[in-house]
Image (cartoon, rainbow, N blue to C red):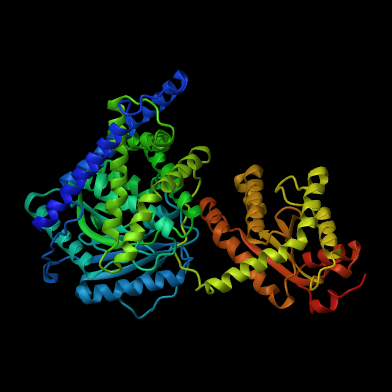
Amino acid sequence: MHRKRVLYYSALTFISLAGVAYGFFFSELFFPSDRAPWLEILLTVLKCSWLVSFPYALLNYYSLFRYPALLPQATDFRAETLRSRLYFRFVTRGHNPQLIAETVAHARRVLKDTLQPHQWLIEIVSDHPLRVDPFDRQVRLFVVPSGYRTASGALYKARALQYALGASNAAPEDWIVHLDEETRFDAETVRAIGQFVVQEEQRVAAAGGQPRIGQGIVLYGRGTVMNWTTTLADSIRVGDDYGRFRLQFEQGRAFFGMHGSFIVINNSVEQAIGFDYGFAGSITEDAYFALMAQSRGVGFRFIHAYMYEKSPFSLGDFVKQRRRWFGGLWLCVLDHNIPFRHRLVLGTFMVLWSISWLCIMMVYVNIFIPTGTPLWLAVTGGLSFSYYMLLYLVGYWRTFNWRDHPVAFVLRLVAQVVLIPLFSVMEAAAVFYALFDPPKDFYIVQKEAPAPAAPARQQLWWRAAGVWRQLPYWPGKVWLRWQAWQRADARDAVTGLYSYDFWLKAIRLQGKLPLPGHSTAVCLTIEVKGIDTFTKKVGVHAARTTLASIGSALTRSLRSYDLVCHHGEGRFMAALLRCPAQYAQTAAERIVGGLNRRLLDDLNHRHDVQLSLAWTVAPVHVNHLSLGALEQITRRLLEGPLPNPASWATPGD
């Protein structure tokens, strides 16, 4: 242990010295630049942004120095000392049933081996029904009713958590462990939670007051990694947990808020505070809850243990996740229901976050366009950058074990350092996205792994084949877009999609292309049920915006050469070209199911309405039909499913 401590503090000292050396090297002592005076002045002013990021960097460094991150902490918990029951509460939208089933099964095995049956219970809070064993007394499912509304209009996860407060039979002295649908833990984590609970109950019994809220560390690279870029980018979250978050929890405060997973809280405290704080408390309900609890005198404590989650599977999800955090935290800062003194620190941090992209950018500008930076400013920038890198390195070292695969560990470590500029761009993109388009809903990152992919060679072949199949359509696509740009009647004013008449002509044009196997298309109608009631409730403008969103989502669900139009209020039509007739039903179910999951569920919860999609589908031999016959068939299709589609979707006028 003594040797590890010496190595740890030696590494911290080396990081500081490296930052100072960087500052000296790129200062005016070594780079007495002879560039244009105006450029010297401009870059020096921009480099002053390093002064803004320095307090944040120094705060994290102090925490890592004061509370060593790489030293284990022993747990002497004994199960018989736990008097209360632990409720492990998973919150999910219900869209990933396989994922939540696997997570709950894993949690059940760990808890069964660690605690007695009367000491724990698993609760699943879902917006949609899930399949659970009705005879399993250790697992309970709560489905939030679609018509459930809170007094202040809480939405999304906050709404589900508020419902669980009344649905659960947890006693006031019991403890709730909040988890996301993919969160996993091991026996050591359960023992650390049990020890925290026992110590808090003993402290309250001896000195009075309220039980504190506990939170630990979440790691993102254990198990199967779906995207190494986003996983390595999330190393900074682990370093941040050991930095400013641990520092505040060790002081018993939550100035920066807290994460939404791995929260250990006494049920009486959670009941007293609740989650019903309207829209401001619904985007980042975890941080809002923490600030509200702190304003009511509740303390916090750090739990030195780990839970395991997955990083976003794509760069798009990564950016949208950060965008939600950024916008939601600003809502917390600007909400006057939280006393100003409890919002001040978080507000200061948000200002720093808003311009953090400039701080990082100037580091790289200074590398490639060195100018005469004053020594004091260069050293400050060097320390800020080195401490920023330190967070990534601490997160990486804490997540991965070099003993498992030494060579892979070293290669990934190199990638961790080399890709920091890319990670900075990803973080900056989220800030820009949130500044120009603040989040209006709770974006859910996909965490359920897709079906196993084909081998790499086969996958490459199919991708190449997919591009090749699209080549014959490019001339027609270019001509159609040119025509749509020239003609005022080619676009629908509400959704921006093709108008019905132009859509028919587009199908006819594609049908004339002499392509083998092109004779069959699939005509699909999708009708938005309940749009009239929705319009009366939210207004015409909001309803049109919703229809435009549905049309845009429908377009993204199709191939680039498929054709979509808006046919009247709440009705869309799509032509799926070169779609075999036997796959028509499957294709339609996939498209409509995707629209339901991605869009309609959020709209229904946000506005308390019941929008739904009805669809009909049939194959059509488009290259043998005249324009009038094609219009007649599509109009018949709008009336509903027709008996024996093969009898009417045959060639002829």
Residue furthest top in the image: 37
**Residue in the image at 58% along x and 68% along y:** 460
Q: Quadrant of residue 469?
A: bottom right
Q: Nearer the viewer, residue 61 or 128?
A: 61
Q: Is residue 252 visible?
A: no
Quarter of the image that includes the C terminus: bottom right
**Residue in the image at 34% along x and 45% along y:** 288
Q: Is residue 198 left or right of residue 272?
A: left
Q: Is residue 236 visible?
A: yes
Q: Quadrant of residue 585?
A: bottom right
- Rendered view: 451 above or below 429: below
Residue furthest left in the image: 206
Rendered location of residue 89, percent (x, y): 32, 63
Rendered location of residue 166, percent (x, y): 34, 59
Rendered location of residue 121, percent (x, y): 28, 70
- Rendered view: 355 above or below 256: above
Q: Quadrant of residue 596?
A: bottom right
Rendered location of residue 257, percent (x, y): 30, 45
